[in-house]
Amino acid sequence: MTRYVLSLDQGTTSSRAILFADDGGPVAVAQQEFPQIYPKPGWVEHNPEDIWSTQLAVAREALTKAGAVARDVAAIGVTNQRETTIIWDRKTGEPVCNAIVWQCRRTAPMCDALKAGGFDQVLREKTGLVTDAYFSGTKVAWILENVPSARERAERGELAFGTVDTFLLWRLSGGRLHVTDVSNASRTLLFNIRLLDWDDEILAHLKIPRSLLPELRASSAVYGESDPAIFGAAIPLAGDAGDQQAATASSRDTRHPSPVTYCLEGSVFVAGAAVQWLRDGLGIIPSSAGVEALARSVADNGGVYFVPAFVGLGAPYWDSYARGTIVGLTRGATAAHIARAALESIAFQTRDVLEAMERDAGLKLQTLRVDGGAAVNDLLMQFQADLLGVPVQRPKVSE
């Protein structure tokens, strides 16, 4: 009998499930978008119930498409948008507020204060991260300070914090598991990457009770089982990794077993989401897939350049207060030029990050390996290869 692995890919704009056969090939895929919430300029939220309901729905849909049932599944693995922060009641499972998304800039003033006090140096030394609103730590502190009774409930041990992986594993297990893996923990600004544990000095400085935090586990391990009521039988929950680390691991030809692996990472805040904005914000394309045809309808960008800093700029600029800009517009500029500039902005931002990585690592990039939705866009991939002057390689399975 064929045995499957069910991969749950919970992303920023959609939830996806892919059922893989025992030969590693995808058998069935299901995906659902869910609402983005923008309460104020620069603020981004998700309803945690939307995250859960869409992820559960696509998991069941993928099984149905393949004609599979729970007993056919050897394990479930979770990969997720990483820094997005959820706090919920341990007894009821009810979130105390909407999830604060990794893109959200509301804690930028808090980060400024940490820098002014010099604590950013402590954070950099212990976590390997810059002090930025991107990461979970200041989001947790914000919730405890601003959601009524949240601090008191947290100090009584009534609440649980997690990134999206932790929230999904908690729900999948029927509330029996409150765990995360090191790849997600390393993006919280609360995790000491040398001790491989939550850092008490940082927790004290941000006034976050340690009891709020999940148990730390390896990325590859059997954490427990799903509640039999969810899929009709218990399935081992046996893998957890943040989306970028999961993608990086999957791009390697060989495996080198190690207790922990350290990497350089550069984060671009808005890439494919710029294309989604063309669809939803401007309405100039019917679907994200339509951007390539529109961009190809002009020979070049016509002097139009797009900086999609909707929620600030990530690496290497780390500017929480930057905002999106389109420059070079003339009377001859069209929607096609803007679409082409949006695609090119992805490649330009990627080049900025890679040049910084080359300087830090003292290495020269030989090949760029890509994956995800944008990787199927031939125009973008060719522009990226030309801009970098190196080959761009795509995987057989883009996701």
Image: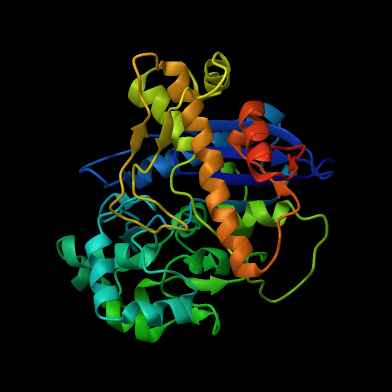
In the shown orientation, is residue 336 left or right of residue 238?
left
> In x, y percent, where is residue 48?
36, 47
> In x, y percent, where is residue 231?
58, 43
Q: Name above or below for residue 98 compared with residue 157.
A: above
Q: Residue at x 29, y 69 (%)?
A: 158
Nearer the observer, 29 or 122: 122
Nearer the observer, 182 or 268: 268
The furthest residue to the left: 148
Nearer the observer, 69 or 128: 128
Q: Name above or below for residue 87 compared with residue 11.
A: below
Q: Name above or below for residue 122 compared with residue 229.
A: below
Q: State the image quarter where residue 362 is shown.
A: bottom right
Q: Name above or below for residue 128 compared with residue 51.
A: below
In the shown orientation, is residue 127 left or right of residue 144?
right
In the shown orientation, is residue 380 left or right of residue 86?
right
> In x, y percent, where is residue 29?
64, 32
> Total of numbered circles in the picture?
0
Color encoding of the figure: rainbow
> In x, y percent, where is residue 287?
49, 20
Q: Quadrant of the C terminus?
A: top right
Q: Residue at x 43, y 28 (%)?
A: 304
Q: Quadrant of the N terminus?
A: top right
Can residue 261 be seen here? The reply is yes
Q: Residue at x 40, y 77 (%)?
A: 123
Q: Residue at x 60, y 55 (%)?
A: 354
Can residue 63 be seen here? The reply is no
